[in-house]
Image (cartoon, helix red, strand yellow):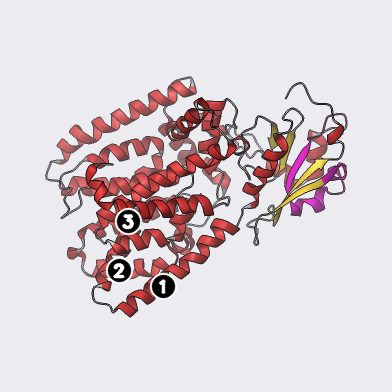
Amino acid sequence: MQLKTWKNLDVFLLFLFVRLLSVVLVGTFFVPDEYYQSLEVAHNLVFRYGHLTWEWHKGIRSYGYPLIFAFIYKILQLLRLDTPLAVIYLPRIAQAILSAYSDLCFYKWSGTKKWAVFTLSTSWFWFYMGSRTLINTFEASLTTIALSKFPWSGTKNGNSEKFIWIIAFLFVLRPTSAIVWLPLCVFHLATSQKTVFRLVVSRYIPIGLIALIVSTTLDSLVHGSFIVTPYNFLKTNVFQNIASNYGTHPWHWYLSNGIPTVLGIQILCFIMATSVVLKARKNHPNELAMLGTITFSVFVLSLLSHKEYRFLLPLLPMMFYVSSRFLSAWSRKASMTSIWLVSGVILICNLFPAWFVGYNHQRGTLDVMHGLRDIAQHDTEKISFLFLMPCHSTPLYSHLHLNVTTKFLTCNPNLNNIEGYVDEADQFYKNPNIWLRQNYPPRDPLPSHIICFDNLVALIGSDILTRYKRIQQYFHCNIPVSTKIGTLVLVYERVDFDNEVPNDTK
């Protein structure tokens, strides 16, 4: 941080406390990418074991993000401090620090002081996401930092072009970031004192090429052959629409579900702020540009069939900017009673979802990894884990940190255009017992442990589980989000496991 940042050290420490608090309190499962597109890749690079999904074999992901965690892992390895807890939590702490710094940038950029602190610190979704090792969280942090350096009208940034460096490298790491930054770059070109030609030729193109060359060189070296990951990413996920294999939603989902959920109670402030901006457009050129960017981004994202809450993260700082400035202007005229009442309502309405999804909902698939690690550390040669769950329901080696034999149901997309293709997970759930008999014939050894949800027991309890005993169970959720997910995560151990002779190979 620059020296002038220390003037706001107290503010940064407050943000850091909130983000580190989320490291401690947020212990639930959100999406597989939090592990399989970051930590598993980093773990594989440093410790030479870790599951690589099809995306990494196809080369549609950049190694830039996982290498951050690989650097952390390498330091831990060299210092012989790579304990399981360090491997699990240090990457989250690193992301929490970056998120806290981006919060500080928002604080300085928005100019709303206390309302900036309040808005960011009480947002349930940012608390839930701010310390996760998701590239979407990383993207949101960098987007906030870039927005704080953007040459907004009437700000001290003036003709600053530092933001271009950030978004250039952000694009090669996360190509869909172009959706958010395209309208902002057009706004920059239209309002800059420099000509469009000069800006494009002297800044955008050179910086973009540098970022692309660095990214391509890095990815090619790690991948082992020449590869341009942004192109592969767009070709596979957008043009070939592979992402739709992982769920689809109607076109209005972001408006009817996504934004209201992400903003929570603060959507009321955002709606009122939007109304004020639209009524006095000349007085709010910056907010108007942000609303245009939000509208464009939501429109484009709505055209894509695969939709997720996390895809809205880069829009969050602009939404918070608009709503916090509205609250700041309102509070200058409001009574202290009204201010405390509104603040209390916002805080209380954010506390419940933050607790429910951050501490309670879908925690079993993380908690079980601690139990499995305790089991595996006694004899890694004898242990073999079979996860009979929807694919990637749990982390893997990045949380075990032990090189044991594992198998889980895969859900690879139909990359080879096979007619009538059904992925392994769907094959299993179509008839679990048939799948088990095909994959574990009578003469083949059974896994030492089976991990599954409690609702699967009724289907396989009279078959393969007759040779197992239940040894652990973990609460997962009150309300399962799918018929394939139960309320408990169960661990079964083969009854003759204690008498088994250790295997020589894995």
Quarter the C terminus occupies:
top right
N-term-proximal mark, 2 vs 3: 3
Whether residue 188 sits left or right of residue 210 in the image: it is left
| Residue 268 at x, y percent in the picture | 38, 70
Residue 327 has which mark? 2
N-term-proximal mark, 3 vs 1: 3
Residue 318 has which mark? 3
Magenta range: 443-469
Determine if the magenta segment contains residue 452: yes
Determine if the magenta segment contains residue 52: no
Residue hosting label 1: 344
Foreground label between 3 and 1: 1
Residue 223 has which mark? none
Determine the residue positioned at 49% across, 36% down: 236
Determine the residue positioned at 78% across, 39% down: 435
In the depicted view, which residue is nearer to us: 357 or 182?
Answer: 357
Identify the element where label 3 is drawn: helix
Q: CA distance from mark 3 to mark 1?
A: 23 Å
Identify the element where label 1 is drawn: helix
- Rendered image quadrant of residue 321: bottom left
Identified by mark 2, the residue type is Leu
| Residue 420 at x, y percent in the picture | 67, 39
Q: CA distance from mark 2 to mark 3?
A: 14 Å
Identified by mark 3, the residue type is Met
